[in-house]
Amino acid sequence: AEINRIKETKFGTWDWNYGKSPEYNIRRGTKFPSGKVEIFANVIESKIQDIKIYGDFFGIEDVAAVEDVLRGVKYEREDVLKALQTINLGRYFAGITAEEIAEAVVE
């Protein structure tokens, strides 16, 4: 019982397994029918420290708002998706879903 408790409270935590990873930079490009999305991100301790989104996609608002939503988010697909679902992505990426953008950010 004690071994399982230690396993779950220390060794099974996200911070223990991923949180102490080194800083790294991500550059990813994904082509969609409605345009290409390029992601440049700086990840520190497995969290998005900074991110820039470029591409030839169409939107009626500046993607800086999307970048703001993603800063500080864990670099995990589910966490990125959850953050993206808090805003109306159709205003930034016409014809591209939150799931597709999350996949473009995190493989």
Image (cartoon, helix red, strand yellow):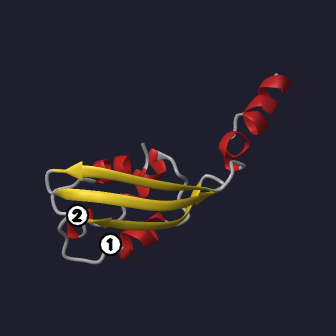
Q: Residue 34 falls in which quadrant of the image?
A: bottom left
The location of residue 30, given as percent across then percent down, is 29, 50
The location of residue 77, given as percent across then percent down, is 44, 46
Left or right for 23, reference 102: right
Q: Residue 66 falls in which quadrant of the image?
A: bottom left
Circles 2 and 1 in contact, beta carbons < 8 Å: yes
The local crowd at label 2, few if under 14, some if 14 to 19, many if 20 or more residues have their Cα within 10 Å, is: many
The local crowd at label 1, few if under 14, some if 14 to 19, many if 20 or more residues have their Cα within 10 Å, is: some
Left or right for 25, reference 19: left
| 42 and 18: which is toward the camera | 42
User: Mark 2 — residue?
Assistant: 93
Query: Which labelled disc corresponds to residue 63?
Result: 1
21 up-or-down from 3: above or below: below
- Identify which residue is drawn at 83% across, 24% down: 3
Left or right for 88, reference 4: left
71 up-or-down from 13: above or below: below
